[in-house]
Image (spheres, grey):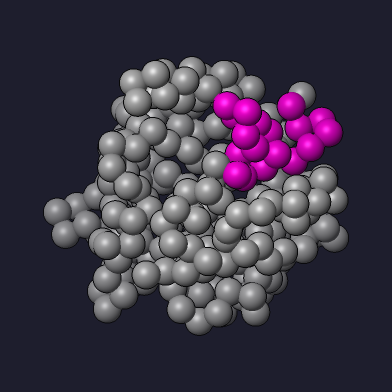
């Protein structure tokens, strides 16, 4: 069981404007609930006890919302008010808060309609003796709000390789299991977690698990409307 997560909530949400003119992307509502609450509630349901949340854009409003939550997981703030460090540097800065055991790292703009428990299945597939990182990956053709060429190919042994050529079958779905020690060689500065993934790929220790469900990347206002329609329809179906 993994009991700690880092929730990446510091971004400006530029593509989400005008919805982010007065709030962070994490506070944009989908189905009457802020994006960050969708993720925190899923983490709580999966047994996660602690969530380290990094904050930057409209930080005061986001922090106040997090403090007002009366359900788990326990929130610990990693403050990036002075400098936004992106997905890699943000993890390095938060290392003193994360502990030494494997953690979940989650993006707040990733939500899904599951066919079966998603985070729980990801934890079951985690093998720390074989894996350094395990990425939740969605089928690109089952993804809403995504128009790219795909990120990774998942091989028979679940190892990942990056896209070669015009298209890859899977896209990173915004959640992964991660060994915090992997971030220690890096400086506290702005960089993407892709930089860490590249090192893990060289060691053949980057693995993928296919998301059992329909993935939604909520990256702009149109994607918000589309995601709400999917969730509303799913609720009707029970």
Residue 36, position in %: x, y?
Answer: 62, 45
Whether residue 15 appears in this view of the structure is: no
Residue 7, position in %: x, y?
Answer: 59, 56
Q: Find the residue positioned furthest to the front.
A: 70
The residue depicted at 41 percent of the width and 57 percent of the height is 46
Whether residue 26 appears in this view of the structure is: yes
Q: Is residue 194 above or below residue 23?
A: below
The residue depicted at 77 percent of the width and 60 percent of the height is 80
The residue depicted at 79 percent of the width and 37 percent of the height is 23
**Viewer-closest of 237 and 197:** 237
**Dividing the picture into quarters, in which one does residue 86 lie?**
bottom right
**Viewer-closest of 51 and 202:** 51
Quarter in which the N terminus is drawn: bottom left
* Lateral position of residue 189 relative to residue 81, left or right: left
Q: Is residue 81 above or below residue 116?
A: below
Quarter in which the C terminus is drawn: top left
Residue 116, position in %: x, y?
Answer: 28, 42
Q: Is residue 155 above or below residue 231?
A: below
Residue 140 is inside the magenta segment: no
Q: How many marks?
A: 0
* Lateral position of residue 112 relative to residue 34, left or right: left
**Viewer-closest of 202 and 215:** 215
User: Magenta segment range?
Assistant: 19-37
The residue depicted at 72 percent of the width and 34 percent of the height is 14
Residue 186, position in %: x, y?
Answer: 60, 74
**Viewer-closest of 219 and 53:** 53
Residue 25 is inside the magenta segment: yes
């Amino acid at each position: 069981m993994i009991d700690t997560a880092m929730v990446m909530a510091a971004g400006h949400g530029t593509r989400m404007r005008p919805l982010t003119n007065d709030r962070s992307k994490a506070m944009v509502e989908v189905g009457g609930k802020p994006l960050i609450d969708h993720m925190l509630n899923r983490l709580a349901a999966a047994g996660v006890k602690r969530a380290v949340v990094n904050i930057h854009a409209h930080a005061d409003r986001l922090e106040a919302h997090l403090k007002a939550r009366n359900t788990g997981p326990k929130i610990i703030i990693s403050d990036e008010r002075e400098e936004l460090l992106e997905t890699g540097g943000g993890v390095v800065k938060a290392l003193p808060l994360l502990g030494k055991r494997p953690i979940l790292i989650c993006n707040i703009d990733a939500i899904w309609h599951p066919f079966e428990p998603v985070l729980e299945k990801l934890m079951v597939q985690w093998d720390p003796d074989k894996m350094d990182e395990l990425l939740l990956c969605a089928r690109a053709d089952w993804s809403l709000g995504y128009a790219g060429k795909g990120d990774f190919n998942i091989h028979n042994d679940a190892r990942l390789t990056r896209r070669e050529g015009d298209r890859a079958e899977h896209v990173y779905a915004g959640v992964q299991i991660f060994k915090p020690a992997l971030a220690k060689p890096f400086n506290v500065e702005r960089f993407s977690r892709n930089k860490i993934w590249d090192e893990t790929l060289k060691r053949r220790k980057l693995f993928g698990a296919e998301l059992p469900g329909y993935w939604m990347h909520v990256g702009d206002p149109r994607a918000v409307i589309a995601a709400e329609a999917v969730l509303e329809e799913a609720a009707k179906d029970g």
